[in-house]
Image: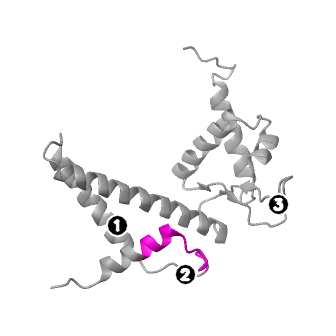
Amino acid sequence: MSRRRDETGWTRAETDVAEVMIWLRSNHGRELSYADIAAGVGIKDGPHLRRAVKLVRVIAANRGDRLERFQPSADPARRDAARRRVWTTRYMREGHGDEFSARDAMSAARAAMTSVKDMHRATTFEAANPHSIARTEFATMAQAADECITKVAGLDTVGEQAVRRENTSLLTQMIADLEARLTEPAAG
């Protein structure tokens, strides 16, 4: 499949990513919806824009910056036509952050811990499976996942400014239960 390149030698997708990156960096710290980004860079809000935003997130991380995940706006005045909160993101340059970015980090940490627990469950099963094609490798992965869970569970509780105490979701409770189990003295 041939990709069309413009006079600079870039494909349309590469140009979209560059335009989105430049525009987001110039709007550092502002809450921005997909509609805001689309209007700012002149790309229709659709698959091309969303793909460009995903790539910008990776590029930002490689630079030491952060493009936060989309979350409901922290500004109660930002509502859509149905009076629902608008989902926004922010481009944060290295060394900057606040409660919004702390919520984003906690959300990412919870998602990652869920994935690590899934990895631990699956690799432990395969390590014990006599018909597994790579029992030793799966045992190594299970041990690494276990060490990750143990390390994270050993961290002090995050302060009130990052986690609202009314958030009593099942995942939060599971992490708290896991932390309690891992810090109990061994029975014996």
- Image location of residue 56, percent across then percent down: 61, 44
Verify CB contact (< 8 Å) between mark 2 and mark 1. no
- Image location of residue 156, percent across then percent down: 43, 80
Q: CA distance from mark 2 to mark 1?
A: 20 Å
Q: Is residue 172 magenta?
A: yes
Mark 2 vs 1, N-terminal side: 1
Stretch in magenta: 161-176
Q: Residue at x 54, y 46 (%)?
A: 58
> In the image, which is nearer the foreground, mark 3 or mark 2?
3
Name the quarter where the N terminus is drawn.
Answer: top right
Q: Which mark is residue 149?
A: 1
Q: CA distance from mark 3 to mark 2?
A: 27 Å
As shown in the figure, which amino acid type bears the numbered disc 1?
Answer: Ile
Front residue of 97/115: it is 115
Mark 2 secondary-structure assignment? loop
Mark 1 vs 3, N-terminal side: 3
Q: Which residue is mark 2?
A: 159
Hey, which residue is sitting farthest top in the picture?
Answer: 2
As shown in the figure, which amino acid type bears the numbered disc 3?
Answer: Arg
Q: Is 34 located above or below residue 121 in the figure?
A: above
Mark 1, Cα crowd under 10 Å, few <14 / some 14-19 / many 20+, is: some
Q: Which mark is residue 78?
A: 3
As shown in the figure, which amino acid type bears the numbered disc 2?
Answer: Gly
Q: Is 56 located above or below residue 147 in the figure?
A: above
